[in-house]
Image (cartoon, grey):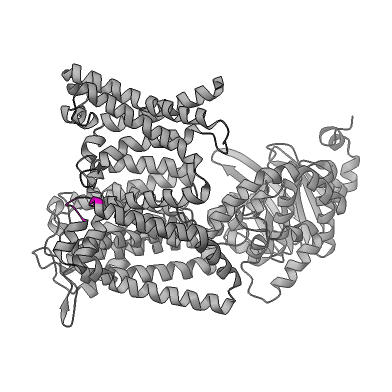
Amino acid sequence: MSILELNDVHAYYGKIHALKGVSLTVEKGEIVSLIGGNGAGKTTTLRTICALMRPTVGSVTFNGENLERYKPSALTAKGIAMVPEGRGVFARMTVLENLEMGAFHRKDKEIGDDIDRIYELFPRLKERRTQLAGTMSGGEQQMLAMGRAMMSRPSLLLLDEPSMGLAPVLVEAIFSTIVDINKQGTTVLLVEQNALMALNIADRGYVLQTGAIALSDSAKALQQNEMVQKVYLGIE
Amino acid sequence: MTRKEWSHLIRIGLLMGLAVLVVSVIGMVEKFNERALIVGYLTLGQLLLYIPALYAGYTSVPAGEHRAMPQRLLGGVVVGLLAVMPVILLILVASSWPGIRSYFVNISPNMVKILTAGKGVGPGIGLLAGEMAALGLIGAAIHLIPDRIRKPIVTAIIFTVGFALFSDVSLNIANQLFARKTVRVLFGTKGITPLATVIVFVISLVAASLWTWKGREAYARRQANMSSEQAKRSQRIATTVLMIVLLTLPWVLGVFLTDVLDRVGIFILMALGLNIVVGFAGLLDLGYVAFYAIGAYVTAIMTSTGNLGMGLSFWLAVPVAVVAATMAGIILGIPVLRMRGDYLAIVTLGFGEIIRVLVRSDLLKPVIGGAQGILNIGRPTIPGLTFTTPQHFYYLILLACLLAWFISGRLRDGRIGRRWMAVREDEDVAEAVGINLVITKLLAFAMGAAFAGLAGSLFAARVGTIFPNSFELLISINVLCIVIIGGIGSLPGVVVGAFVLVGLPELLREFDEYRMLMYGALLIIMMLVRPEGLWPSPITRREMHAAEENAAAVEAEHSSDIRAAVEG
């Protein structure tokens, strides 16, 4: 059974038909990249998975269970964590408080251990633990947003454009951490415009064009694909 | 002096001149002149003229400048004269063209008389110009005095003026404690006598000197050396003293001031509630008065002995009023859940107006009295006592405020407080960490409305009659101003804000006509000088502090990012 499955999902913004039958699967333990240009429907797909939007037609299932009846806020407890586009941090809380907020629904006693684990993944966060999140640099905020998401112990991590607005050297750091997170057992669905980086770390990939899946294959095969090379990788 | 320095002087001088002109033309000087500060010597109106000149002189000297003092003093005289120029023009125009009154109603002969000190136009102008120039000079000369002497003097002067301005407070206390004859030596009908001025000045000067020279350091040293146990004990002592003061206050202050305190208390109660909605949860609510009205009307209908009322006990009405307001909070909350920021403000504003219109409507007149309101609202009673005087109500309101304070603090520090904070920071991220926005927001609206309902209930019982006019939009604005000026999200800030915005205007009745002007000016000044509020919450303070450091942080950002990346 796939951990996540979208089956012929259609979604609308008012009259605009944003998703026109998106089907995709994410298997346990994978990194799957969803790439595509501006307005292709990448974020809409993520929003539909997170129940922030409801599919008009089609279904989203998580571990075989239809997510239709869940509120967005209930998904954290089910094991889905989302890092929204453009740094999802609480600007006026400290780094530590942000991480604690990530474990908000948890009542167990291992939260402290998990914070230490996040500090291992992102040593910068430990240095800055008493700093207000809003005063940190873009890269640090992205790390914090990911750390915060990991605090809910998700089985599926959804990342929306983690590379956006970051210096190339930072993008590499962020992506290598995504690989680390994945190795520790979290399945990752990565939505990216930076197709080069996204396909580098992914097991499989989907190409989204104007609201529909145009291509799907292993990441290696997609990197070799002529259309992907031309349109998304900039290789002539 | 260089060109730049001249233009600096001209700018300050004319700006202050404009201020003097405006307060004269809108009639403030004339109105405030009725209020004596030091009997026979200084009125509030005069103070209004003098402060700009003094301030102009003070700011004419660039910060940290001590060279070429004679030039600075000359600069002080120049700004003093500039500050008086516009108003001299006004005097000339007003005295030669009486018809101007049909355009500016406040430019009266009496105003001219006040400005010229009743000495006729020529000598009067000379005198005024001389005074203002002298004040400019003094303002500049203050910089000559070394810090450790200047500070106590300035503090003592400000305290003395403040004491004279709020002489009502001390007069009322004195009336409780001393014989009338003694009181008359120190207080006029308005303001204080010269003798009292000297006494207050000397005492405050001595106290301020001791504090500046010795006390501050000693206090800081003691604070630093205190063990946590000692700190706890001194905190306990402070709380006990505060409680004793709070409990004895009405008997020291007398009826009039206790009544003022009651009004302040009701606004504290409301502001604590709005603080939950606006301060904790970040939801801008401009229709807050609606819940206050609901609390008041429910209490009125249930307890009134008139033909509209049921004549029930106040104690029965209070919980019903609170529950009704809470329900209204939830009912308002549901449709506005999806709104943010400005839109939320507009919808809540509309809700407040709907309630007000309903209350005065003919439709509901048979039930809630329409424009005639509800009379004969029942007084709370306990065995052996009926609450009638302001002193009685003081204890009731105090109890409610303490309860609201306690609940606010517990909510803020608990899980629900964290949820509100998260929603305030970022709704999307809050949802992503698993916070149910619907419940969180509704809880904020409900809690805020409950406090307002309680406040309305107490208000109705205290005044005995309520009218639709008591529940205007202005109350919402007022309460919001209290929260903002006190410090958003801060409990002590709310109390300070209520005293400043509700208490002070009660003591300065002369200001009444200009209350809104003062509010506006105060809000603007606060946003420029102290945007975090008078007594900010630790979180806001932390954030403001961080904003200062931010510039440095942004500078370091690039290099630190790269370093982070290289490190791993």
Q: Nearer the viewer, residue B75 or A116?
A: B75
Q: Residue at x 44, y 63 (%)?
A: B443
Which picture quadrant has residue B245? bottom left
- Looking at the image, the residue that sits furthest to the top is B96
Asked whether residue B542 is in view, the answer is yes
Task: Please indicate whether residue A63 sits to the left or right of residue B54 in the image.
Answer: right
- Bounds of the magenta span? B187-194
Q: Is residue A106 above or below residue B14?
A: below
Asked if B173 appears above or below A21 in the picture, the reply is below
Residue B226 vertical position relative to residue A137 in the rendered view, above or below: below
Q: Position of residue B206 (x, y in %)?
A: 41, 58
Can residue B297 be seen here? The reply is no
Left or right, B371 with reference to A93: left
| Residue at 76 percent of width and 63 percent of height | A118
Quarter of the figure with the C terminus of chain A: top right
Q: Is residue B437 left or right of residue A5?
A: left
* Quadrant of the rendered image containing residue A92: bottom right
Quarter of the image for the N terminus of chain A: give it: bottom right
Q: Residue at x 71, y 74 (%)?
A: A110
Residue furthest toward the left? Answer: B307
Residue B308 location in percent, x, y?
A: 11, 63
What is the magenta segment's predominant secondary structure? loop
Is residue B191 highlighted in magenta?
yes
Q: Is residue A128 magenta?
A: no
In percent of width and height, residue B181 lies at 14, 62
Residue B226 in the image, given as x and y percentages of width and height: 58, 74
Q: Nearer the viewer, residue A86 or B399?
A: B399
